[in-house]
Image (cartoon, rainbow, N blue to C red):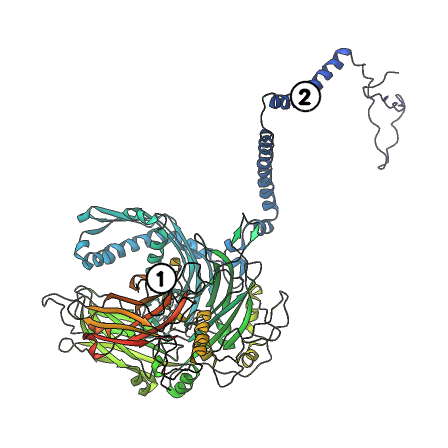
Amino acid sequence: MSSSVNGVGPKPAPAVSQNGPDSAPTPKNVKTPEPVVPDEEPQSSVTDATQMGIKFAKTFLVIFPIYVLGYLEFSFSWVLIGLAVLFWLKRNQGSRFARVNQALAFLEQEERAVRQTVRSSELPPWVHFPDVERVEWLNKTVHQMWPYICQFVEKIFRETIEPAVQGANAHLSTFTFSKIDMGDKPLRVDGVKVYTENVDKRQIIMDLQISFVGNTEIDVDIKKYYCRAGIKSIQLNGVLRVIMDPLLGDMPLIGALSVFFLKKPFLDINWTGLTNMLDIPGINGLCDSIIQDIIYSYLVLPNKITIPLVNDTQISKLRFPMPKGVLRIHFLEAQDLVGKDTFLGGMIKGKSDPYGVIQLGNQLFRSKVIKESLNPKWNEVYEAFVYDQPGQNVEIELYDEDTDKDDFLGSLTINVDELQKEQKVDEWFVLDDTAKGKLHLKIEWLSLLPTPDKLDEVLSSIKATKGQANDGLSSALLLVLLDSAKNLPSGKKVTSVPSPFVQFTVGHKSFESKTRFKTNEPVWEESFTFLIHNPKCQELEVEVKDDKHECSLGTVSLPLSKLLQEDQMTISQRFPLKNSGPGATLKMKMALRILSVEKLAVSDQPSSVQIRRPSSSVTPSSSPQRPNVSEPTPASKAQQPTPTPRTQPTPTPSPRVEPLMDNRPSEDSSSRLAKSGRSTSNLAISGSLLNLNNKEPTPSIASDISNPSTTQELQRTIQQLQNGASPGFAPLGEIQLTIRHSAQRNKLIVVVHSCRNLISSTESGSDPYVRLYLLPDKRRSGRRKTNTIKKTVNPIYDQTFEFSVSLVELHRRTLDVAVKNGGGILSKHRGLLGKVLVDLTSEDISKSSTQWYELSVDGLKRSSP
């Protein structure tokens, strides 16, 4: 019997009947017999030699390259390179197969494939929220109307914007739009939400999630200077709120339309031509932020576009709404943050330099940076306006400051409506979008009262005194509605027509209206909001100026105490202008409101803020303690908050937290903040006033005492020096200044002579220098600084500094003089030695006056014993 190649004989063939009937059917569990395999011929020696040669060739091809590498003395790294190439090829081939499998899975299970491959933030809002509707019919309608919308936009640019730019300045007289093309990609509405609860029955509120990625081309040409510039693409994404208010019983059924963004939308502009220089790295971020802030000043709440549809609608109430309330945000501390500063390529974990960014609408606040800490303590206070619009959130983000791009440390989002219900919240919040970390916030809702009944109570609670008329927490809110002016005089030239604008000033806070070009009877219709510390002592100063000739056209001064005597604390009239032409008037409306915390009864229900979002859960301490705030008295001891585990304990009702936080009923929390060195200025800022890209904290009048450790150290030193000292002794020393104003040069001249009896930071003395600001200007360009005198407590400077300011404006300014200890970069003794705030309202300011000023921690004069 012949054998097969494998040495196994073939199976015998079953017997088959050739002439008989067919065999019975085979059962299902019995396999059909295989066909007969014919016997194979035995392999010849030639076949065996061929197979042997093939095996030898394969072995040679594997071994020979290794021999060649050794013979040519190649490094072993070439083998690693070959392996890396091989792995890359296999990975690339695997990725192609993965894409094919992904496409097949998408066809079979679309929803599951989308959720696995697309990030949640990239999905349209109607996927996440059931109350957001998908409106493809609206997108189809906009797509059909888009060419006609482009024609309407081009008409606005050529008939309205172009003549306005040409008339604004003589150098722009040849300004023209050479090309206006909005592109063929229309605006899309990704989702619409209509509010039906907690809404007035006479209005309709809806949110439109809009996105626009257009190949827009807008080119401008100034032929006089052969200058060409333009835009070649625009990207816009945000939530646009549309309010139809009021609803009417007659056509057109809607009184007016109001359109605005609840918070700043994403905006990206691609420049071309001369403006393409704005895309240069280092300049593009600054220019984009400035342009965006200008746009946001028109479209982000409280700014809005109001379109009246009938004549008798109260448009002023729609354009200039009164804030619903004020949020006082105590930005206290954080714990267990992620360390982002690493060393040796991430092998050694370091710490972070954390700071916080708080955003509510177009109001932005940036805290100071705490160096090298995972448990920072900021102890700062911010006050933000809240308008009567549902769906607003307080958004807080923590970052680690770096020289290049700041690292993200976590975020937190709190609904404003829930804060209004709670009135007071003092909680530890777990940070979202990060591995660990929690943030301690204390937030108070301040209601607006139209009567002065509770003013004295509020002033006593924030410890407002006459000497602190412009500093500290706010007790009132002032809303100013600027309407128009009449019979304004000409500028410096009698024949010229002025281009007026109005400057409003209360304390250290100033606002300027838009400029109305070439008119004696301008109409502004703008609103301005101030946070007032003490309305009994402060006043509103209004000055109409000519932008073209930079001169004053008239002034108005109104003490805020006059508003306290008016009905509903509101005045609306035409005010005659001083130092102006005959019959010159300014029409304004002013309303004052008292800020008061409504005290609610203690509730056993948990705070709704804690369950605002699943990722924004709160982990309060089992027994809430008072924050780490040192008091001036040596007997007071700061208590640390109890460390909180990552697991969720039973939430503690927020109303019960406040009695535990207040260990001394006779002293309000605001006074403790002031003593602990927290920044308590009126810091609500409209969007264009703050640029977070410059990495500077939100400006504060109390910036020199915003560091609690510096303040506490100075206070301890004062207590030590005052033990056994005479009442007239000045523990922080004195500084000698000469101050005068030159009316001819419009300059304030300050001569820093010397200091005496300063605090000695070391045994050999201090390294003092003097820093000057002319408040409210605290920009770096407005800072003046003397030389540093080494190792002395009685330095002599004799240096002269000048500030450009007119005599009229000087009475609204305050000279901030701070004596600081310099030292080296790594010196631990750097910091504040004392400061003084010099009042410039003296009538003898034009005369040279030299005197000694006593230094203090906060710059205010100490009351005599």
Disc 1 crowd, CA 10 A, few/some/many (<14, 14-19, 20+) = many
Q: Secondary structure at mark 1?
A: helix
Q: Secondary structure at mark 2?
A: helix
- Residue 178 horizontal/vertical position (percent): 24, 48
Of all residues, the one furthest to the front in this rendering is 764
**Residue in the foreground of this view, choosing between 458 and 614:** 458
Asked if residue 276 is positioned above or below residue 831 in the image, the reply reads above
Kind of residue sitting beneath label 1? Tyr
Asked if residue 22 is positioned above or below residue 145 in the image, the reply reads above
Residue identified by numbered label 1: 296
The reply to whether callout 1 and callout 2 are in contact (CB within 8 Å) is no
* Rendered image: mark on residue 58: 2
Kind of residue sitting beneath label 2? Lys
Closer to the eye: label 1 or 2: 2
- Circle count: 2
- Residue 275 horizontal/vertical position (percent): 29, 49
